[in-house]
Structure formats: C-alpha cells, structure tokens
Amino acid sequence: MNENRNLIFYQQVEHYTAASDISQFPKLDLPEVCFAGRSNVGKSSLINSICTKRSLARTSNTPGRTQLIHFYNIQNKLFLSDLPGYGYAKAPKYKRLEWTKLMESYFKNRINLTRVFILIDARRGIKNSDHELMKLLNIVAVNFQCILTKVDKISSKELNVVTKDLISQIENYAAAYPEIIQSSANKKIGIDKIHGCLNLILNINGNT
Ligand SMILES: Nc1nc2c(ncn2[C@@H]2O[C@H](COP(=O)(O)OP(=O)(O)OP(=O)(O)O)[C@@H](O)[C@H]2O)c(=O)[nH]1
Ligand SMILES: [Mg+2]
C-alpha cells in the first residue's frame, strides 16, 4: 500500500469498546496490536496520528488519563489497543496493583495479540518500569517493538545517542524486535513506518 492508501485505510477506524477487566475484552476474532508505555509518553496521540483523526483517542497533559484499555477497530481487520500508562510516580499503590492485574490478564488472554509497541519518550530514554513490562512480555512470549516518541523535542545528535542506548538495552530480550522506530505525533514523523509494520501484520493474517 502506498502512503495515500494507508491514510484512507487507517482513517476508517472506530472506537470499539473500553475495558477495565477481562469480561469486557472484545470477542471479535481480529489480529491486534497494542500501544503501551509510561504515562504521558504519547500513546493516544500516536494512535490519533496513525489514524489521522485528531480526537479519536483522548490525549491529555495529566499523566494517567487513560485508565481503561481502549480498543479501536479498523474496518473489522485489525484492533489497535491503547493501554493505560504506567510509571506515574504519584499514582497510589492500589492503582499500580490494578494496572498490573489488568495488564497481566490482557497479555495472557489476547491470543491474537501480534505485537506490542512500547513507546519511550525520546527525551527520557528507557526506564525501570519499561524493563518491567519487557520482562513480562518475555515471560508470556509476546513480541514487542520500541517506538521513541516526541523526537521533535530533541536534536538529531541527542536522538542518535538515545536510539543507540535503547538498542543496546533491549538486545537481551528474546521478545524484542531489534528495529527502533523514531516518531513524532506532532510532526508526523515515523507514521509511514508504523503503517508499514501494521500492513505486514495484516498481510500475514490474510488481509490486504
Ligand atoms: N511535542 C510533542 N508532544 C507530544 C507528542 N505526542 C504527544 N505529545 C504530548 O504529550 C502529552 C501526552 O500525550 P498523550 O497522547 O495523552 O499520552 P498518553 O501516553 O496517551 O498518556 P496517558 O494516557 O496518560 O498514559 C500531550 O500533551 C500531547 O500533546 C509529540 O510527538 N510531540
Ligand atoms: Mg492516553
């Protein structure tokens, strides 16, 4: 698909449902990819950019805004899911426990989950809480790929340093894709690459 066709395809998206526990997860049998990462890293903004819909997924300056898993259905061919953020220092302990419980049941039960995109703020780099998620994905054997976000906020020199560091920090995870995507939802950087990844997943599952 060329980028114009991608834009038209991914724009045909609908908010399918939001879930706070396993009983609310969609039963529809579609391949799925999800967007995970620390609070405020830019998950919802990136989903909006992928789908070129400004207000599809709610974005906010307040960390921890997305508390539920939001499922977006693209033409009954693919689910994109927006996971609640983690690593917010001020979150009360019971909230963190709720998050862990929800994430464990999500990763263990979404049998069509093809890839987890782990978003990492390019200004901050990888944190312990990202490693915790990577360890969990290694255990449940779900592949993940890292996306650096907000690259419009740093210089290309800084971006090179943070990218190299990330590559070296994920190389020991069996579940990790070695290729890192550099992105900016604001400046539409890397969106074509993400479309390319999603198209491959659709092709593998027999959809074009
Ligand atoms: N400069 C810049 N700002 C961005 C970019 N992406 C997101 N932001 C800003 O970062 C803030 C958080 O974005 P969200 O998309 O709500 O982040 P989130 O990861 O969904 O946050 P939670 O749902 O709270 O976990 C908002 O103020 C966005 O406008 C980007 O590519 N560049
Ligand atoms: Mg969000």
Image: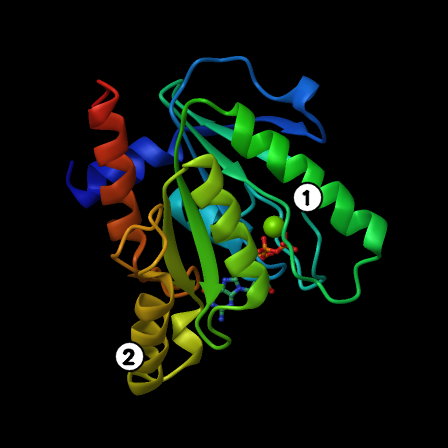
Q: In terms of sequence position, does the residue under pointer 2 or pointer 1 come before the other? A: 1
Residue 91's quadrant in the figure?
bottom right
On the image, the x and y values in percent for residue 180 come to 30, 60
Residue 30's quadrant in the figure?
top left
Q: Residue at x 47, y 36 (%)?
A: 140
Please identify, in this view, whether the residue under mark 2 or under mark 1 is nearer the observer. Answer: 1
46 with respect to 1 (left or right):
right
Q: Residues within 10 Å of mark 1 (few under 14, many from 20)?
A: some
Q: Residue at x 70, y 44 (%)?
A: 99
Q: Which mark is residue 46?
A: none
Kind of residue at disc 1 = Thr
The residue that label 1 is drawn on is 100
Q: Nearer the viewer, residue 31 or 128?
A: 128
Q: Which mark is residue 160?
A: 2
Q: Residue at x 84, y 57 (%)?
A: 92
Q: Residue at x 67, y 64 (%)?
A: 61
On the image, the x and y values in percent for residue 192 come to 25, 51
Across the whole image, how many numbered discs are drawn on residues?
A: 2
66 with respect to 131 (left or right):
right
Q: Secondary structure at mark 1?
A: helix
For the C terminus, the quadrant is top left
Q: Nearer the viewer, residue 157 or 118?
A: 118
Ligand 1 is within 8 Å of the C-beta of the residue at disc 2: no
For the N terminus, the quadrant is top left
Kind of residue at disc 2 = Asn
Q: Nearer the viewer, residue 167 or 27?
A: 167
Q: Can residue 53 be seen at all in this image of the molecule?
A: no
On the image, the x and y values in percent for residue 154 come to 40, 81
Rendered position, 127 above or below 46: below
